Image (cartoon, grey):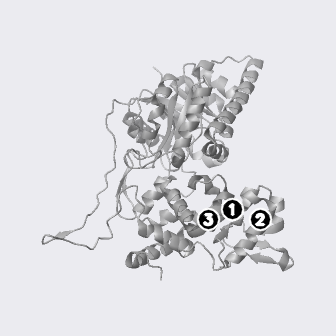
Amino acid sequence: MSSVLGVYLSDHHSWDSTTNYMRALQPAWVVIHQPTARSIWRAQQAAPDAKIMLRSWDIDDHNGDRKREAYADPRGAAGKHYDMWDDLLEQLFGELDRNDWEYNIDQWYLQLINEPDPVYLPQIIEYTAEWMHRTTWPLGVMVASVGNFGIPGQDPNNWSLVKPLEQQIRDGGHILVVHEYWQPEGPSFVWTDKQGRTREDAGNLAWRHQHIPLDVPILVGEAGPNGFIYNRHTNTDNGGWQNYMTPQTYTAQVHEYIEGCDSRVAGVALYMTDYHDDQWKSFDTTPAHEALLAIQDARPVENETVYVPTVVVDGPQIENGEEELDIPISEYPQPGIVDPHVALAIMDVESGIDGFCSNGKLKIRFEAHIFKTELNNDALFIQHFRIADSRPWEQPQYMYDDYFGVWISIHDGEYEVEHKAFEVAQNLNREAAYRSIGMGIAQIMGFNHVRVGYASAEDMYSDFFISLPAQIVAFFNYTLSDSALMDAIRHRDWREIVHLYNGPGFVDVYAPRLEAAWQRRRERGYRNE
């Protein structure tokens, strides 16, 4: 019997040790990242019965480009990405045949969009259905990131929305793909957060698949301990198992995880065998291969348990038969509800709860470091803008012709200066400029236009320019589309709210401001005096 313990192949620095491991393990599944003819041939030589999930970053991600295409035009993107896969497969077949390397395409699967944003779940479902209509290839579908999609009954963007695809997934021989990481303390870790709440990772990180209400096979396409989760151990995505434990402890956690999976799980591909670059070196499973072979027979149990996190909410207190009207601070809103005082506090910090300048223009903040990325032309950028090498968001400058070549600080507290920098950027690349500004009462970045309901950043700007209600609707679309942000808002985790809303560079400055603004809003409600 093939091992449920699978393999995730990266750039294959050590083919001899990798193929020896696969020969001994005989995994049921091998995920190949950026597949080449050689990597497919070597994998099928070593594990001829393994199913091969081909994952092309250029087609399923590409810095989010493919996701944005799928969100904006699901059917059109499916056609485009189908053609891209067709071209790649033709190249692979050509190289395999030229080298006379044996291969078996009956074992191949193609992975679709990698780790889509849950708010676009309806579009991803439409995209997936179009793919299934177009191809006879078996597919890896949905490809949910750790902690996604939502749990039915707790989040509107939840797995129950995928139910209409259930029969097509089974009939087409496709497989549902999820990624399930856990914190270095282990998959069953129970911990206390900064607000004193008990947090249970089981069912929310590891084993979240048990909430999926579909009778379909599941591939855990990435798995393992990760210190980057919740930023508890590291603030950068380099938190693989080697930073925290021995191969024996790592193997024990993997064993616990596999046996805790339910019987729909056909494979668990540990992230990763070898690594693309040093950022991912700590995830490399190679030093643990000998230990992992000792658990190659581990299998999911027939597990009917569904992990549902419980949250205890302190209700209004009853004294002498009368309800106490003073609601304690420890009481949190129910899941799926944006606490109005936290929402007001966010808008207070972002704009002073005013989406417009005194001259009637839309309030914006031009982010030069974002524009540099969006422009993708460093030579042109440095002619007009300056940013620091470290913390580039803090003191950007622009050169405006009216000032005869003098460099002007952009973030000097005057919105008019922000608009002038924005005008300079528009003259260089219009859409890149719109994507690089925070807009309106909630200062939502233009590159989030699809997430809040607009086809382009310029369309978003045009609506915001004339409509405060449009700005507010966009704010709630933005918050409701991120379950982690919603959780942080619900529990008033100020640092995590700032981290998710503004980025890690602003946490120390904005978190105290946000908490103070919330205190003010609790005291005076919606009054803005």
Q: Amino acid at mark 1?
A: Ser
**Residue under the point 84% across and 60% down:** 379
Q: Nearer the viewer, mark 3 or mark 1?
A: 3
Residue behind mark 3: 464
Q: Amino acid at mark 2?
A: Ala
Residue behind mark 1: 436
Residue 143 vs residue 490: left or right?
right
| Residue 425 badge | 2
Quadrant of res 502: bottom right
Toward the bottom, the furthest residue is: 529
Image quadrant holding the N terminus, namely top left
Does the rendering let one see residue 333? Answer: yes
Report if the CB atoms under discs 1 and 2 are less than 8 Å apart: yes
Cα distance, mark 1 to mark 2?
9 Å
Toward the left, the furthest residue is: 320
Between 304 and 459, the residue placed more toward the observer is 459
